Amino acid sequence: MKLGNPEIARRLLSNGANPNLKDSTGFAVIHDVAREGFLDTLQTLLEFKADVNIEDNDGNLPLHLAAQEGHVRLYRRAAVVELLEASSSLPPSMD
């Protein structure tokens, strides 16, 4: 997958590519995207339900790799968007 091109990612995922498929190091695409700071592609992966809690063979989450490379602010922004979208599908609270 061309990591910096969200349109290619979208086409592959729309045609059934598994966003959580891992390579021999345990990296899923979301690990590479988070590490490189490709926010547009990260958002595309999140739309297709890529697992933000998927670990590589060393136990690293995508967030860990983003933080190591100084991209933590980008990653948090995308994660917040995902959480907001997920919460909008919940029934309203009965408080």
Image (cartoon, rainbow, N blue to C red):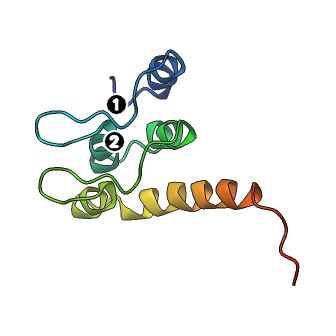
Label 1 amino acid? Answer: Leu
Q: Residue at x 41, y 53 (%)?
A: 52
Instruction: In this rendered view, identify the residue nearer to me: 39 or 20.
Output: 20
Q: Position of residue 75 (x, y in %)?
A: 43, 57
Residue 45 x/y as whole percent: 47, 38
Which numbered tag is attached to residue 33? 2
Determine the residue positioned at 26% across, 63% down: 64
User: Does 47 sit left or right of 88 as displayed?
Assistant: left
Are the residues flagged by discs 2 and 1 in contact, CB closer than 8 Å? Answer: yes
Mark 2 or mark 1: name the one nearer the start of the chain.
Answer: 1
Quadrant in the rendering for residue 73: bottom left
Q: Mark 2 falls on what kind of element?
A: helix
55 vs 33, nearest the viewer: 55
Most extreme residue toward the bottom is 95
User: On the image, numbered disc 1 is attached to which residue?
Assistant: 3
Give, as a three-letter code, the residue at label 2.
Val
Mark 1: secondary structure: loop
**Vertical placement of 71 versus 93: above or below?**
above
Q: Would residue 81 appear left or right of 55 to someone viewing this image?
A: right
- The residue shown at (27%, 41%) is 32
Label tally: 2
Q: CA distance from mark 2 to mark 1?
A: 6 Å
